Image (cartoon, grey):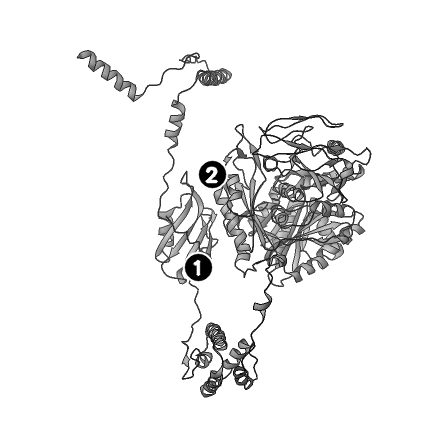
C-alpha cells in the first residue's frame, strides 16, 4: 500500500504509512469503510472521505458520500478504550456491525492495526479524560466502549457522560463492585445475594486469628484491583499467614492490599456468567468458562486466564435462570437503590457448589472478561454497536441477542515465566499461517509489539489468544490447537488441556441451520403402504407397521422361547422390506441389551433374535463390568534435576514402567517440568501411584499426579518418547556471529562500543580508588583486520611449495 495525503473538510491532513501499520493521532489511518458522520451534539454534522486498505494492492481507494445518501438506520463511530485481547475481540465484533461507520482503539496494539479491525491511536492518553473527550469531538465519536477496569474505576465514564458522549461502562461509583471486594460483599449481605462467608481485616494479627479459627483451606483476597492476581487459595495455615503478611505487612499489592477479605473455601466448579445491564434491565449473554490456573490439570498459581470456551455445559438453561433471579437482578436493583445505577457488563464469577449444585457469587467484574470475551465475540451475530447503544440509553428491554450455533474456544499463549517475571522481546512468527490452517480461526493480540524489522514480538504476559469455532466443542478445540501449533514462538507456552471438563461430557453437534437444510422431496418422503399380508400378521400382535422399536421391546419382554417362535412364524408372511427393517431393529436392541445387562438373570433371558425362521435362541455370554484400565499418569511440577533416570528409579518402586517421557524444549533440551509415565500393569499400579504421590513434597515441589483416561491419551503421546534432545551449540553460534565479516561501518560501531565500555571500566576503577593503568585497545577503527581462515593457510603452503620447485 502506498502513501497518500488527504485534505479533509475542517480536519488536518491524514498520512497513510505502510511501514508501521501502527498510527499516532491526530493523523490516524482510517481502516474502515463508510462515511464518518459527526455525532457531536455541540457542532455541525461533518462528512469525511473514507478509505480502505488492502495489503495486496499498492493504492488506496477513496470515495465521497453525501449526507443525503445516508441510510435510515442510525450510524455510529466507536472508540474502544484499551489494548489487550479483550479489546481486539470487541473491535473484531464491531467491525462486523452493519451500523458501525468506523472503529478507533486507544492505545490498541499492532495486531489490531495490522488486521484492519480498527484504527489504533497509540499516543492518546486514556487516563486523561479531557484528551479522550477532545478526540471524540474531533472525530465525531458517538460511542465509547471502555474495556479495562482501571479507567472505569478512575471515572472516565463519568466525564464522558457529562460531555454528552455515550459511554458503555459503569460510573466510578458503580465500578466499586470490582474496585472493592468489601463493597461487593456488603451489597450481597444487604440484598440477600448468595456468596461465601467472609470477614474484612486491616490488622494482620486479627486476620490470622480468624484464619486459625476457621481452618484451611481458606481464601485470602486483596480488597482492591490487583490485575487478576490478588486472590490466594491457601491450602495450609502457613500459606494463609504468608498471604496475609504479603498484603498487609509487605504491601505486595500496594494500596489494593491495604485491606484483605478472608472468606470460606467453596468446593465445586467455577463458571463465568455475563449480563448486559442498562441500569434497570439485564439480559444474559451466552455462557462461558475459563481456566485460571497456569498449568495443565488446573495446577499452579492463578492467572488472568489461560483459555476459555463457550457455551459452558455446566451452566444449563435452568441454572442460568436461577443466576439471573438470585444474583443478577438483585444486584441491579440493589445498585439502583443505593443511588449508583449500573450500566455496562456485569461479569459474575460463580462457583457451582459440589454438594448442593447451586451457584454462589465469588466476585464481580464490571467489564468483559479476558479471555471469555474472545469466544463470546466470535459467536455473537447481533449488531454489537446497536446493542451497546441500547444499553447506554436504557432500552435493553427491546433487545434480543443472536448467537451462532456450535461452540468456540480460545487458547491463550503466554510468555515463559508468566504469571511471575516473564520474558519480553522474543520474536513471534507464522501468525497469518495460523489463521489459515483451519476454518474460522482468529488470532487476537493481547501483549504484542513490533521490533525495528517489523516482526511481532512479545511485550506482555498473556500475548496471544488463538480462537476457533466449530460444530461442537471438540471441533473448536481441534481447530484452535491446530492454529497454536502453527505459530513459531520459542519464547511462549500454553496449556494443552483447555476445555477438558466439558470435553469429557457428551457433545451436542450442530448440523445445519434451518435455512440451509435441503427441502425434502414430496415423493420419496411418503411411506409405502404395507401389504395386506403384513397387516394381517401384525394385527395379531396389536402393532403398527411403523412401530418396529416397540415390537423389539415387546419381544424382549417374552421369556417363553416357544411363544417367541410362534411370533416369528406369524411374521413369516411379511414382505422382504419389513423383514429387513425388523431384523435391523432387533439387532440394535439385542446389542443394547447385552451392554446394559450384567446380572445372570438378564443374561439368561437375553437371546440373539437374528434367525427370523425360529429355532432355539442363543444365550449371550455374561458381561463383566469393565475395570478401570487407565495406566498413563500425568506428572506435574517436576523439580529441577529430577529427570528420566531419577523418575524411573523413583516410580519403578511401584511397578514395571513401560514408557516414560518428560516434556522438553526442542531447542534447549531443558525440562518443562511435567511428564508422563505408563506402567505395564493396567489400572492397579497407576491408580495406587496417583493416590499416594499426588501432592507429595519432593525437593520443595508438590508433585501433581493424575490418571489419564485411555480415551484422553493423545495418539502421538509416545511418539519419539526415548528421543534425547541435542541442545544447540550456543558457543559455536556465538563464535560464528563474532567472526563474521563486517563492513567498515559495522566495524566502526563495534570499536566505538568497545572503547566506550573500556572508558566506563576505567572510571569505575578510579572511583574505587585503585591506581591501575589500563592497557590500550589494540586495533584500528578505520579498517578491520582480515579474518584468518584455514583456506588461506593452504594457499600459503601451496605458494611455498611452488617457489621451492
Q: Which of 507 and 655 is in front in this view?
A: 507
Instruction: Calculate the distance from the C-alpha at mark 2 to the C-alpha at mark 1.
Output: 30 Å
On screen, residue 257 above or below 130: below
Query: Which residue sits furthest front?
Result: 523
Residue 444 visible in this rendered orientation of the protein: yes
Residue at figure coordinates x 60%, y 63% from the top left: 355
Percent x, y of residue 738: 40, 23
Percent x, y of residue 8: 72, 28
Label ID, residue 526 = none
On screen, residue 70 above or below 505: above
On screen, residue 164 above or below 684: above
Residue for badge 2: 490
Q: Classify mark 2: residues with Cα within 10 Å, few (<14), some (14-19) or many (20+).
A: some
Quick check: marks 2 and 1 in contact, CB under 8 Å?
A: no
Residue 353 picture quarter = bottom right
Q: Is mark 1 on a helix, strand or loop?
A: helix
Query: Which residue sits furthest right?
Result: 42
Q: Is residue 554 left or right of residue 362?
A: left
Q: Which of 563 and 275 is in front in this view?
A: 563
Percent x, y of residue 514: 63, 59
Q: What element carries label 2?
A: loop
Residue for badge 1: 710
Residue 415 visible in this rendered orientation of the protein: no
Which label's residue is closer to the chain start, 2 or 1? 2
Q: Classify mark 1: residues with Cα within 10 Å, few (<14), some (14-19) or many (20+).
A: few
Q: How many marks?
A: 2
Q: In this view, does 707 lie to the left or right of 114?
A: left
Q: In which quarter of the image is the N terminus?
A: top right
Percent x, y of residue 435: 53, 43
Residue at figure coordinates x 42%, y 54% from the top left: 715
Q: Quadrant of the C terminus?
A: top left
Amino acid at each position: 500500500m502506498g502513501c497518500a495525503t488527504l485534505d479533509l473538510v475542517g480536519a488536518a491532513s491524514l498520512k497513510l504509512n505502510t511501514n508501521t501499520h501502527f498510527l499516532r493521532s491526530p493523523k490516524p489511518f482510517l481502516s474502515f469503510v463508510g462515511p464518518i458522520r459527526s455525532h457531536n451534539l455541540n457542532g455541525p454534522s461533518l462528512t469525511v472521505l473514507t478509505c480502505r486498505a488492502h495489503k495486496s494492492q499498492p493504492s488506496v481507494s477513496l470515495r465521497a458520500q453525501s449526507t443525503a445518501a445516508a441510510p435510515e438506520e442510525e450510524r455510529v463511530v466507536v472508540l474502544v478504550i484499551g489494548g489487550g485481547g479483550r479489546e481486539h475481540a470487541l473491535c473484531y465484533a464491531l467491525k462486523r456491525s452493519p451500523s458501525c461507520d468506523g472503529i478507533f482503539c486507544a492505545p490498541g496494539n499492532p495486531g489490531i492495526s495490522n488486521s484492519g479491525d480498527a484504527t489504533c491511536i497509540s499516543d492518546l492518553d486514556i487516563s486523561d479524560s479531557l484528551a479522550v473527550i477532545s478526540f471524540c469531538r474531533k472525530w465525531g465519536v458517538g460511542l465509547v466502549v471502555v474495556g479495562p477496569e482501571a479507567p472505569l474505576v478512575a471515572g472516565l465514564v463519568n466525564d464522558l457522560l457529562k460531555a454528552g458522549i455515550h459511554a458503555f461502562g459503569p460510573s466510578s461509583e458503580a465500578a466499586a463492585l470490582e474496585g472493592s471486594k468489601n463493597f461487593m460483599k456488603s451489597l450481597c449481605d444487604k440484598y440477600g445475594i448468595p456468596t461465601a462467608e467472609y470477614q474484612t481485616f486491616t490488622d494482620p494479627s486479627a486476620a490470622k486469628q480468624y484464619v486459625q479459627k476457621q481452618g484451611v483451606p481458606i481464601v485470602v483476597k486483596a480488597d482492591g484491583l490487583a490485575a487478576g492476581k490478588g486472590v490466594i487459595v491457601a491450602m495450609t495455615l502457613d500459606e494463609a499467614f504468608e498471604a496475609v503478611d504479603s498484603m498487609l505487612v509487605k504491601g505486595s499489592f500496594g494500596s489494593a492490599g491495604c485491606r484483605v477479605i478472608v472468606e470460606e473455601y467453596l468446593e465445586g466448579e467455577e463458571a463465568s456468567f455475563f449480563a448486559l445491564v442498562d441500569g434497570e434491565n439485564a439480559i444474559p449473554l451466552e455462557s462461558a468458562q475459563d481456566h485460571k490456573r497456569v498449568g495443565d490439570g488446573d495446577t499452579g498459581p492463578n492467572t488472568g486466564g489461560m483459555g476459555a470456551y463457550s457455551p459452558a455445559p455446566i451452566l444449563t438453561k435452568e441454572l442460568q435462570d436461577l443466576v439471573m433471579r438470585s444474583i443478577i437482578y438483585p444486584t441491579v436493583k440493589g445498585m439502583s437503590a443505593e443511588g449508583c445505577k449500573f450500566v455496562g457488563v456485569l461479569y459474575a464469577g460463580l462457583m457451582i457448589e459440589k454438594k448442593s449444585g447451586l451457584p454462589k457469587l465469588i466476585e464481580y467484574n464490571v467489564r468483559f472478561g479476558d479471555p471469555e470475551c474472545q469466544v463470546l465475540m466470535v459467536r455473537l451475530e447481533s449488531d454489537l454497536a446497536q446493542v451497546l447503544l441500547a444499553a447506554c440509553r436504557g432500552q435493553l428491554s427491546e433487545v434480543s441477542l443472536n448467537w451462532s450455533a456450535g461452540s468456540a474456544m480460545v487458547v491463550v499463549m503466554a510468555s515463559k515465566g508468566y504469571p511471575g517475571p516473564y520474558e519480553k522481546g522474543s520474536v513471534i512468527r507464522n501468525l497469518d499461517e495460523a489463521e489459515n490452517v483451519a476454518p474460522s480461526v482468529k488470532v487476537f493480540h493481547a501483549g504484542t509489539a513490533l521490533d525495528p524489522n517489523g516482526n511481532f514480538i512479545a511485550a506482555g504476559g498473556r500475548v496471544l489468544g488463538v480462537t476457533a469455532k466449530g460444530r461442537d466443542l471438540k471441533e473448536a478445540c481441534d481447530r484452535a490447537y491446530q492454529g497454536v501449533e502453527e505459530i513459531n514462538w520459542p519464547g511462549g507456552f500454553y496449556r494443552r488441556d483447555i476445555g477438558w471438563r466439558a470435553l469429557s461430557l457428551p457433545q451436542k453437534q450442530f448440523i445445519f441451520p434451518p435455512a440451509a437444510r435441503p427441502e425434502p422431496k414430496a415423493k420419496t418422503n411418503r411411506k409405502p403402504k404395507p401389504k395386506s399380508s403384513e397387516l394381517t400378521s401384525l394385527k395379531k400382535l396389536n402393532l403398527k407397521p411403523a412401530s418396529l422399536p416397540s415390537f423389539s421391546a415387546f419381544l424382549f419382554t417374552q421369556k417363553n422361547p416357544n411363544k417367541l417362535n410362534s411370533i416369528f412364524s406369524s411374521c413369516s408372511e411379511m414382505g422382504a422390506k419389513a423383514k429387513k427393517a425388523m431384523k435391523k431393529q432387533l439387532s440394535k436392541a439385542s446389542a443394547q441389551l447385552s451392554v446394559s445387562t450384567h446380572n445372570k438373570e438378564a443374561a439368561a433371558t437375553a437371546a440373539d433374535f437374528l434367525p427370523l425362521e425360529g429355532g432355539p435362541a442363543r444365550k449371550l455370554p455374561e458381561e463383566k463390568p469393565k475395570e478401570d484400565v487407565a495406566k498413563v499418569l500425568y506428572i506435574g511440577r517436576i523439580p529441577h534435576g529430577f529427570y528420566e533416570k531419577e523418575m524411573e528409579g523413583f516410580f519403578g518402586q511401584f511397578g514395571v514402567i513401560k514408557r516414560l517421557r518428560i516434556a522438553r524444549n526442542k531447542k534447549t533440551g531443558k525440562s518443562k517440568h511435567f511428564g508422563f509415565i505408563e506402567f505395564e500393569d493396567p489400572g492397579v499400579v497407576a491408580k495406587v501411584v496417583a493416590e499416594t504421590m499426588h501432592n507429595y513434597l519432593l525437593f520443595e515441589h508438590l508433585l501433581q499426579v493424575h490418571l489419564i483416561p485411555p480415551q484422553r491419551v493423545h495418539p502421538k503421546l509416545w511418539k519419539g518418547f526415548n528421543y534425547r534432545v541435542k541442545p544447540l551449540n550456543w558457543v559455536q553460534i556465538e563464535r560464528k556471529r563474532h567472526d563474521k565479516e563486517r563492513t567498515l561501518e559495522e566495524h566502526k560501531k563495534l570499536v566505538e562500543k568497545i572503547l566506550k565500555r573500556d572508558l566506563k571500566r576505567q572510571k569505575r576503577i578510579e572511583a574505587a580508588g585503585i591506581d591501575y593503568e589500563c592497557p590500550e585497545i589494540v586495533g584500528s577503527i578505520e579498517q578491520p583486520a582480515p579474518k584468518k581462515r584455514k583456506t588461506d593457510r593452504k594457499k600459503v603452503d601451496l605458494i611455498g611449495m611452488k617457489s621451492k620447485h
